[in-house]
Amino acid sequence: MKQKALFLDRDGVINESAPAGDYIVSRNQFRLRPEIIPLIRFAHATGYLIVVVTNQRGVSLGLMSEKDLDDVHAYMRELLRAEDADVDAVYSCMHGYEDTCECRKPKAGMLLQAARDLDIDISESVMVGDRQTDIDAGKAAGCKATILWK
Ligand SMILES: [Mg+2]
Ligand SMILES: [Zn+2]
C-alpha cells in the first residue's frame, strides 16, 4: 500500500528564514521554529511520512557548498530528533533560476521524486509552505491539500 506524506518547506516553516536575499549557509544561522513541532508529531502519529522539499539556490550561487547544506540538514535533524519530530527525508534543489531544472519550486520535481523513491500517493499528501511557490508546487504535484504556513 502506498504511503501518504506531509511535504514541508524548510525556510520559514521549520526554521526562521534568513533576511531577504540572504541564505542559511551554516548551522550557526539555523533557528528552529518550534510552532512546527506539533504538526510534525501529529502527522507522524497519523501515518504520514515527513518529507522536506527546499529550494537552496545559495549552492548554485557559490555561497555554500553541497557539504555545507548537508551539515545544516544534519543539524536540523538533530534538533528535530531531540523534539521527537524527525523527518523521513530531505530533498533540496541546489539549482539557480538559469538552470531551468524540474526541481525548483514552484515546479513539482522534488515532490514527484520523493513519491517515486518512497512509494508515496501524492493525491493523499499535503504540502505546507510559507510562500505561494510552495503552494503552487503542491498543486502542480497533485497534493490533496496545501497549507500556507506563516
Ligand atoms: Mg519558505
Ligand atoms: Zn533544481
Image (spheres, rainbow, N blue to C red):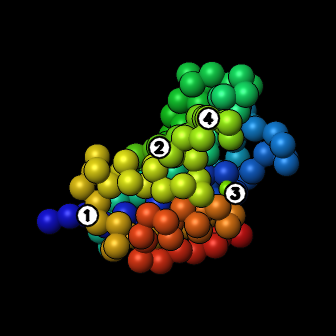
- Alpha carbon of mark 3 to alpha carbon of mark 4: how far? 24 Å
- Percent across and percent down for residue 76 are 56, 42
- Alpha carbon of mark 1 to alpha carbon of mark 2: how far? 17 Å
- Element under disc 3: loop
- Alpha carbon of mark 2 to alpha carbon of mark 3: how far? 16 Å
Residue receiving disc 4: 99
Identify residue type, mark 2.
Answer: Tyr
Identify residue type, mark 4.
Answer: Asp
- Alpha carbon of mark 1 to alpha carbon of mark 4: how far? 31 Å
- Element under disc 2: strand
- Which quarter of the figure is the N terminus placed in? bottom left
* Sequence-first disc among 1 and 2: 1
Taking the spot 28% from the left edge, 50% from the top edge, the residue there is 116
Above or below, comparing residue 71 to residue 23 in the picture: above
Identify residue type, mark 3.
Answer: Gly
Residue receiving disc 3: 12
Above or below, comparing residue 141 to residue 70 in the picture: below
Q: Nearer the viewer, residue 24 or 27?
A: 24
- Which quarter of the figure is the C terminus placed in? bottom right
* Sequence-first disc among 3 and 4: 3
Above or below, comparing residue 126 to residue 18 in the picture: below
In the image, is the residue at mark 3 within 8 Å of ligand 1 by its beta carbon? yes
In the image, is the residue at mark 4 within 8 Å of ligand 2 by its beta carbon? yes
Left or right: 130, with 121 as reference point: right
Q: Return the mark for residue 91.
A: 2
Identify residue type, mark 1.
Answer: Gln
Depth check, mark 4 against mark 2: the one in front is 4
Q: Are marks 3 and 1 in contact (CB under 8 Å)?
A: no
Residue receiving disc 1: 3
- Percent across and percent down for residue 60 are 66, 28
